[in-house]
Image (cartoon, coloured by chain):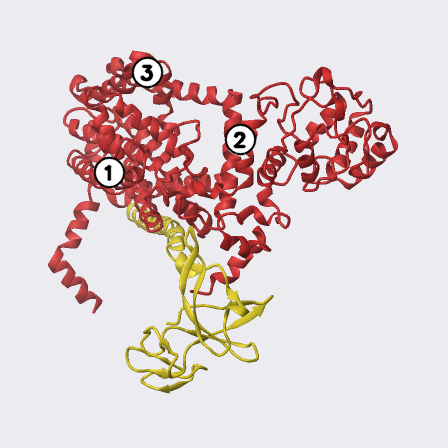
Chain colours: A red, B yellow
Amino acid sequence: MANKFREWIEDRTGLSNFLKVALDEPVHGGAKWSYVFGSGLVFLFILQVVTGIIMAGFYSPSSTSAWGSVYYIQEKTSFGWFVRGLHHFGSSAMIILAIVHMFQVFIFGAYKKPRELNWISGVILLLFLMGFGLTGYLLPWDQKGYWATQVATNIIGTIPIIGDYIKIIHQGGSDYGNFTLTRFYAIHTFLLPISLLFFLFIHILLFRKHGVTPYWKTSEEVLKNRIDPFWPYQIFKDVVFAIGMYAIIAGWVFWNGGAELLAPADPASNFLARPEWYFLFLFELLKYCQGNFLIVGTVIIPTLAVIFLFVLPFIDINPSKYPSKRIPFFSAVFSGLVAVVALTTIAVYHDSHDIHIQHQKEDLEKQAARAMKLAARGIPPQGGTSIFLNDPVFLGEKIFKEGCVGCHKLKGDGGENGPDFTNFGSREWVSGLLKNPKDAKYFKESGVMPPVSLPYESLLDMTEFLLSQSGDLLNKNNDRIESGKDLVLKGNCVICHPFGDKDAKKMAPNLTGYLSETWLKEFIRNPADLKFYGARNKMPGFDKFSERELDALVQYLLTLSRDRILVSEKDGEKRPYLFGLSSPRTMTDFKNSSFVILQTGLETTKRKSM
Amino acid sequence: MENSRRKFLKIASYAIGGTLAAGVAAPIVGLAVHPWLEETVYGTEDFINIGKLDDFPIGVPKKTTITSSKIDAWNIFEGLVMGSVWVVRREDNTLNVFSTNCPHLGCGIDWGADVNQFLCPCHGGVFDVNGRKISGPSPRDLYAFDTKIENNNVLVRYRKFA
């Protein structure tokens, strides 16, 4: 039966003959490890296709739903993070392998007559790969993709005369929106794959026509006598290489916990735009092409480089494949490589040594982590950024930047009248204050309190005790709290600072519940109250804040400390409002619930369909 | 010699290629079957609050809309009207909450105040105030929902009947 079926198929299709032709391709000079790169790229392409198609089944290309759907793939499905990671790092692997493949071909002189078109189709494929990278980067619609792609489309805009028109067509309007995503998605998933397949077909067809280009020292005799059939000799090497690559990519995905997903794109923010690493050299190049010379970096140099690659087989017409006979071309191509590597290195080095950029990166990671937490309860239909609308921390940050940063420095930015709020309320911050209140970071000359002249360990004990009053301290150390309590209550502190009764007044601020929510709120409302600074106060009171604003500001201040549990990570018992502000309906629903209860509630109701 | 090498390479290629294909396919399939593993569209509330007990007159069915929120994959839709129910409050303050859809073919059921019966306008189904079938083509009594009263609030476990 099976035999008959096979015969029938064979009769109607001629399949085995086709397979024979495909697989028995003679490899002159023998199968070689140096030939695995091309097939490796085909494997990676297939990997991109299958991971891409499966993700397309979850992804939604619109400005209100793109981030949410990628968030869903990343956080809510069992293997989504891994598949997305494969796709993300697979694209990097493809770029690397394509470059390696190109250099192998170049070094072996495989672009020379009669293989000119082979080379040219390869260059086109490389350009397509970059197109994939560029369009794919935007699709998650997160801060990174959104802002980096803005740079790319603006670069298109610098092309003389037609630039603006191309840009508008490309992004589907004069600004980013739904059409930008639908277009990028269509290009990424239809136009580019189809075009790539077409040129890949030509590329492989031409390769089959002309065969491999062996190592230049291989003698004619070996070429003639040593012939391995493609299957299994070369295929064996190819699959070993492919599984090796897959192991590395999969390992890389595990190591990184999948691909990064930052907070949803916020057109109002000023994000640090950085392209994917393989475009960094172009990005860095632009720093040196200023003013009217911008076009040199955006259009002229890249165009010249591409033209050079296209015409290479026609200007290097010496039939010899020996590198020693091709020194000018070797130096041209390798100096190009050196320039790209150097520019990339400079870009990476510059970013890693810029404290502002590092701080910004930290903030982005925090924001992203917060976005993940907030999105867990569902994203309102207004889109990704709406998860922040009711987030007190987000609002608090805004209030801080509007009302506080004039006097309080934060991570290097801001005024110097008041204490620096970097890592505010952390062990480091409080112990530093105890050590020297007059320090430039704290009260400067207006610091009346004498430094606590105790060993550093004792300062830490006191700090631990003081901070333990406000709760949510990470890794609380009870021994320290006990000895700190003795130091504070039996030492000199209580001579000036009231302790134990929240409303007691002495000459220095009342430390009952120091840095707790209530303490901070009362303090911000009226720092000149007699239980705080009294006549010595220099900070204006902020009693104009509504309860909600004040609450938000305090929540934000609490997140500044690295020693505190993030608001969103807590069980949230005390903060039912966290999710309750969007509508009266949810207000009642969630009044007595909390983040955790809500989440577990979802778990239990999940199984019951509507 | 050469033949056995060739054979070995063939088997090895199949084995490695098969492992590779399985390794790629596993997470892909794992992701593809996600909708089997987890509900993607569901209501956020088990029991839905439909109002105060006193909102419902004794003995007279009252039609009430069910408003709740729904999770749809990554989205949450709040304040969404999910459907409506007939609420009948009895003398002893217990409640009957019926689906407004006829068990026959799902038409919307009306309350005939003049005859004190639920009437289906499509195929003439008739039900009494307790939802019991009196006549017509319906295979059963009206669908009823679990209810409970908490702090004078009426809560209904609403769901769609197939």
Instruction: Look at the numbered disc 1 and give the secondary structure of its residue.
Output: helix
**Residue drawn at (19%, 50%) of the image:** A19
Give me the disc on residue A377: none
Residue type of the residue flagged with mark 2 = Glu
Q: State which chain disc 1 sits on.
A: A
Give the mark nearer the N terminus: 1 vs 3.
1
Question: The disc labelled 1 sits on which kind of residue?
Answer: Leu
Kindly identify which residue carries mark 2.
A362
Label 3: few (<14), some (14–19) or many (≥20) C-alpha neighbours in 10 Å: few
* Image height of A405 relative to A601, above or below: above
Frontmost residue, A44 versus A158: A158
Quarter of the picture containing the C terminus of chain B is bottom left
Give the class, few, some or many, for how many residues have Cα within 10 Å of label 2's Cα (few <14, many ≥20): few
* Residue A222 seen from this side: no
* A206 on left or right of A389: left
Subunit that carries the residue with mark 3: A
Q: Nearer the viewer, residue B149 or A6?
A: B149
* Secondary structure of the residue carrying numbered label 3: helix
Identify which residue is drawn at 30% across, 17% down: A297
The residue where tag 3 is placed is A335
Rendered image quadrant of residue A36: top left
| A147 vs A381, nearest the viewer | A381
CB under 8 Å between discs 3 and 2: no
Q: Which residue is mark 1?
A: A192
Determine which quarter of the picture holds residue A193: top left
Residue A522 place in picture, x, y as percent: 69, 35
- Separation (CA) of disc 1 from disc 2: 35 Å
First of labels 1, 2 by sequence position: 1
